[in-house]
Amino acid sequence: MESLVRFAREELGNPGLATLLDQPSFAFIQVLNSVSQGMNLFIIASGLSLIFGVLRVINFAHGAFYMFGAYILYSVAESYELGFWTGVVAAAAGLAAMSIVIERGLFRFIYDKEHLMQLLLTFAVVLILTDLAKMIWGTDQYSVSYPDGFGGAVDLGLTRYPTYRLLLIVVGPVILVGLMLFTARTRWGRLTRAATQDREMLGALGVNVPMIYTGVFILGSALAGIGGALAAPFNSPTPGMDATIIVDCFVIVIVGGLGSIVGSFIGALIYGFVFNFGSVIVPNWQDVFPFLILLVVLLWRPWGLFGRPEGEGA
Amino acid sequence: MRYVLAVVAGVIALAGASAQAEIRLGVLYPIAGTGAVYGVPAMFGHDLAVDEINAAGGVNGQPLATFKRDTKLKPAAAAAAAKELITKDGVNVLIGGLSSAVGLAISEVARQEKVVYIATIPKTIQMTTTKLHDHVFRTASHTDFEGDAMARIVAQLGIEKLCDIQLDYAYGHDLGAGIVRGLARHAPDVDLVIELRPKLGATDYNAFISQILGAGCDGITSGLWGSHFVNFAQQAKPFGLFEQAKYISGGEIASHEIAGKMAEDYPDNVWSNTYELWYDHFDPSHVEFQKAVAEKAGTNETAMWPVLAYIGVKFYAAAATKAGSIESDAVAEALKGLSIDTPVGPRTINPEDHQADTGQFWGPMVKKEGVPYRMMDPITYIPAKIAE
Amino acid sequence: MESVRVMPRPVAAVCAVVVLALLVVPLLDSRYLIDLFTEIMIYALFALSLNVLIGYSGNVSFGHAAYFAIGGYTCAILLTTYEWGFAPAFAAAVIASALAAGLVAWFCVRLTDIYFAMLTLAFAMVVWGVAFKWRSVTGGDDGFVGVSVPAMLDSRIGFYYFTLAATGLSAAVLWLICHSAFGRCLVAVRENRIRAGFVGINTRLMRWWAFVVAGTFAGVAGAIFGMFHRGMYIESAFWTESATVLIMTLLGGIYSFFGPAIGAATLFVLERLTNEYTEYWPIVLGMILVGILLFLPDGLAGLARKLASYRSRGG
């Protein structure tokens, strides 16, 4: 092992890799970093994937929803001092309300249009929402404190790790299981799944399909709001925070397979690991890796790791 | 087709109005989107200077008029805006710029169009060295001064293992290089273990934080500014990074914009810099200046950016007065070696490299009984000089 | 669908008027207008090139900015860092864009629809990443600033006429391509890929060529852009730039050859004018976009056509 460390440091000239091999605690922290970053992204990406699965719309505005979540949390928790967790709930509720307006007022007109039209309409919503956020919250940057009891770190034996990050590591799987139970066990969930398969048939059976669409859109958007709210303490709400997150979410959702929740979960983990370990082993190129994964996956399995091939073949 | 013609006619009409009996200042700050948190306060200082000069009868009998454009904190947008200010609004000078990349882009337009550009905020050393030209002048400090001051603090604190984290663009790279040069002068024995380069606008710093922890550094040098620092600090605190290492930062995180806003969230063991301290006063004129800025901004405390924008305008007015002209070459000639008094002391522009001798306040950020934010104490003014 | 090789008379007349109008712009003696029209022509060509892919072959690229950026950076770097002459640098830039487009297209034509769009996006972001991280060559996040432009293009008016000639010629070539047998095959592929395959069209090859043509002319536009601004910046490769050109194309109308150019001019001028009065350009653009998508699916060109036919019916 020692010779390997020396090899990495001296022959490869890669201090990051050497430290990784040399210090188990460092490697362990990187694993936790990867998972916690992945889980925060999963919360947001799962909403995007859920919406695509049913509505067949890739929602560019999802990043803006995330930003609104962070801003709402700031207003509720910091400006009105109603507490952090109230802020999270308010973010979810706020996004649910917003999404009803957007879905009923705009999106429902484009379900049968081409993907290009849909993508551009959602992009138009991005433009409108980002300016709206600017009108409401201005262009200041805000600092959000960690919720009580989560500002410190926990001793995990090998290392100390921030409590709040550990919370994210727990919340991610909880949301995964919750969404899976919802689709597998509840009537609404079963209808939702049916809607991804054949919406005409479902309509013919007397199911209120538009209602399902609205419901799924609310749920997906609320997840973006929760993701944004939970990110606020370590990612201060500022204009422009939507533009980076949406591309990250695209990568995750497509790598995992459009419409697959488990796929998003795995995709988010891959993203986290590649970003965090990549930044150690190939320093300073971490921002390009996600797109390389996306490329590889699209070339190898265009429908994603957990997606189903559909209408392919030219 | 008729539509196109109508638009053309409209554009011509708009472009037509150019007869002028005023001196036109083209001002470039990020005033709308990302970065407006700095650009908007800068405009307060700018407007204050313009108001003062106009109240005193203008420059050579002509009033100053401001034409402002948003740079969006992006070099491409800034270059396009600078060009439009010159060709459309017919401005006589360009003032401002925020972020080194933006400053370099505006400077390039100034070079092509032969219009004087006074850089009030960008600090990249390239502007007054490799990319220097006849029409660019800087009233801000620069990355070599800043890096040198940081290296001095590193030596003073007796740091042994140093980690450097800088944003991946002109400012970060040049500050990193400035620190390395400074270390060679002041602390040649310090071991610079790793150099990390997150991108401008990065939000997740965990991967970098753990690398600093893993490297076992007892000192960190950094130029993460604005929200970059806020996010970095919020993520690094729970790891105990600020207990393990002393954080020596350029990028003016001792300013009100950061220290005032973060209040009790501001981490321990930070040494930083600023051009302006709202709780410190240079002389009575400074007190008055702070009061006037606060009034313009509608706050009680002075942000840091106004003073920089203010000084830029004052330099231009003084140069145009000295030259008795607003013709670019004459103003450029007058700026060389020009000295003026500012609220934070006298400033002189070096005729060789067009750089003003703008120093900064440096010191540790400490907790004070009954004060909601961290204060710099003791305050040391490090002049713009590379000390051997 | 235009199926004649010769330009219909009204279209030819409008083209002649536009070219004449553009020829006299420098006589107005306004630096601002010269710059404005130079940039409009560049974006018009950029949008026209994208439409070969969208309007004629029905593939939506979400990464068209990549080829614009490759052309721009290649030309700028060769002119400045390597001090090449104008002609070889410009030619090399166009070839570089064509090669890059050829390579990417080879992968992308295997996919369709949303997956095609996402793969073009992924490739474009890799190009962005390279421009961002290859600092020693591209200048990274600061941009590649201070491009040396040959003396003959140094004057504003000289550059204007160069842009007019280059974009005009490119547009003419694109017109010929789109209205050749090749163009008609593309339309057939767009309308029904499977049936086009049955009648013996190699649909993948057709789409590959469309991609290459689009990328090549985006490269031409990019090379001119870099010289015009004396700099290239990584924003030019970012996905938002791809979105902008897509909006321009859509605004003008994808089922008309010149539609995208009209869209580019409109959007560009609109942005300049809106910025004069309000900082809230994005929200205005967003509203316009919603309007087009919900009420004008064929874009401005479609609207113009509708109005024309309405009037000719004597309404």
Image: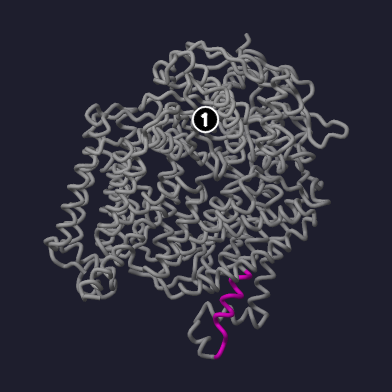
| Residue drawn at 61 percent across, 75 percent down | A215
> Which segment did they paint magenta?
A206-219
Measured from the top left, where is residue B322 in percent x and y?
48, 13
Counting other residues with Cα less than 10 Å from the Cα at mark 1, is it few (<14), some (14-19), or many (20 or more)? many
- Give left or right: position of A218 versus C222: right
Q: Position of residue B317 (x, y in %)?
A: 51, 21
Q: Quadrant of residue B219?
A: top right
Q: Is residue B176 visible?
A: no
* Magenta-colored segment: predominant secondary structure: helix
- What is the total number of numbered labels drawn onto the structure image? 1
The chain carrying label 1 is B
Residue C49 placement (x, y as % from top left): 28, 53
- Say if the magenta span includes residue B297: no
Q: Position of residue B6 (x, y in %)?
A: 30, 53
- Check disc 1 and report its element: helix, strand or loop: strand
Task: Relative to C193, say whether B144 is above or below.
Answer: above
- Would you identify the image quadrant in which residue B111 lies? top left
- Amino acid type indicated by mark 1: Gly
Nearest to the observer: residue A137 or residue B224: A137
Q: Which residue is mark 1?
A: B96
Q: Is residue B237 left or right of residue A110?
A: right
